[in-house]
Structures are given as structure tokens and as C-alpha cells.
Amino acid sequence: MKKYFLLLMLFSLHVWGQRELQQEKLLGDIKTLETKTFTVVEGVPAKVYNYNILNKFDTKGKLYEVLFLGNDELMDNKEVIAYLPTEFVKEVAIYNREGRKDKVMTFQYNLKNQLIKEIKSVTNKGVEYESTFEYNDQKQLIKKIQFFPSIDYTVTEDYSYFNDNISELRRASHTGINTEKYLYNENGWLLEKTELNDKNIVFSDIFYEYNEKGLKTALIKIDETGEISYFEQYEYQFDSKGNWIEKKIYIKGDWTSVEKRNITYF
């Protein structure tokens, strides 16, 4: 299927600043993708899920609706996605439990189909934030400026690259400058993220491991003393198409939660 689901990661732009979010390759012509998360206590998953996210795709593979459901099976909120004729996302409308449109995210592109502006507005309150984006001659994002008018607050992110991967992110705000540095393997999968504070001192190193499909199987966090302060591990089960349908999450060796997917196909 076309990767419109992955395009939706661009809404929050975690794909740029949080490279541990890998671009999963969804296989087959997916109609719906539902993910339920269950807490696990003493090795036994809860009977009732904590939350549920339902993604809906059209026959062309475009994600057109995302439902966020509480454990009461009622909708907490809903996102409805509209596209331009170029098939890039034009707008995301966010509705609350009562069905009222609470927020709207709009996206503007240049003639090269590069995202240059993102605006998030709140009904009856105005603009929550406005982000602008700049690119180099290689069509790589090099700067993001996000402005929050209600509190007169600006965050600026500058990106550096090694080959086609982001190698460094510098995030500047009124509180100072923080830096993240990234290392990848030959497949472009993130292997290490180093975090530095506003004094340019390393306070965290995060290492990642993957299976042959490129799915993350482990996350290990090292603090400034060189000790392991946190680690996660993941185990997967797959359907006949090769998409994962169950993901067990272990935190510091303890099985703490499980994500279960129900995927339907056209």
C-alpha cells in the first residue's frame, strides 16, 4: 500500500526530531488498522484495554480518518484528513467526543511540494501554534520555527545531515539550546541518539536494536554516569501479510503491556 499512514507522522514532525520512530512498511491493501493497548500485571494482560486507535484507509491507500477510543468503546476524539489533488495532506480536522470540531491543522506547500507552513488553530480561541519550514538544495529540511502566539514563545530547530539521514538536531528556545545527535546503520535505521543539554554536556545516550524486518526490538538508555537507567524490549507476532499484530513490551525486564492489532484488507 502507499505510505499515507507514514505521511501522517509529519503532522507532529516527530519523524524529524524523534528518529527512533521508524517508518514501518505496512504490507498489503489495508482497509482498517486497529491498535488496542492492554496493561499486563504479573504476566496476565488486562481484560479491558487502556486505549484504542482505529485508522481507516480508502481504496487508494490514503488514511482518511483516525478514531481515538476510550476503554468504554466511546470516541474520545476523531481526526479527519483532507488531501490536495497532489495527494499531500491539506487539513486535519480534530473532533471531540460530542462531535464538535475542536481544532484544525492546515498545511501549505511550495511549488516543489515541500511543506512550508503548518498552522494549528483552536475553535473560538485562534492559533495555537504556527510552524514554518526551510530546506536546502538537496530538498532536506534544515530549519523548523514554531511560534506559540498566546505565550509569545518560539522554538527553533536546525537540522544537519550525513548522507540522507539527520545527524544532528539543535533545538533553541528561551530556556537555551539542546542538541540531539544521531547514528545509523547501513539500512538507515537509528542506532544511537545522544542528548546534550544547554551546556553542551551529554546527559543521555539511547541505543536501539532491530529485527530483520527493521522493527525495533530494544531500547537502552545510558545516563551521564555511564549506567543503564532504563531499557525496553519488544516481541512481535505477525499475520499472513507480514504485518505485526501483537507487540509485547518489556520495561526493565518486566512484561508491562501488550499492543494488539486487528488489520482488515481490501
Image (cartoon, rainbow, N blue to C red):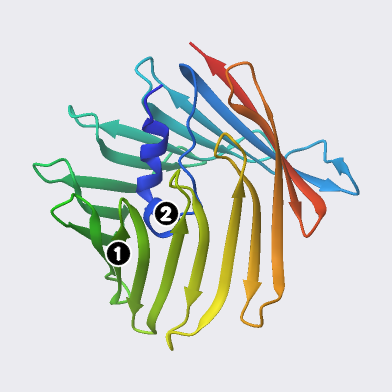
Spatial distance from mark 1 to mark 2, Cα to Cα? Answer: 13 Å
Look at the picture and state if 87 lies above or below 179: above
Residue 70 rendering spot, x and y as whole percentages:
64, 41
Which residue type does callout 1 highlight? Tyr
User: Which residue in the protein does label 1 denote?
Assistant: 159
The residue that appears at 21% across and 58% down in the rendered structure is 133
For the question of whether residue 125 can be seen, the reply is no
Query: Looking at the image, which is closer to me, 225 or 248?
Result: 225
Residue sticking out furthest to the left: 111
Quarter of the N terminus within the rendering: top left
- Provide the secondary structure element on which disc 2 rests: helix
Near-viewer residue (162 or 235): 162
Residue 98 at what x, y percent from top left? 49, 40
Occupied quadrant, residue 60: top left
Residue at x 18%, y 29% (from the top left corner): 86
Give the residue at mark 2.
14
Amino acid type, callout 2: His
Q: Which mark is residue 78?
A: none
- On the question of residue 169 being in view, the answer is yes
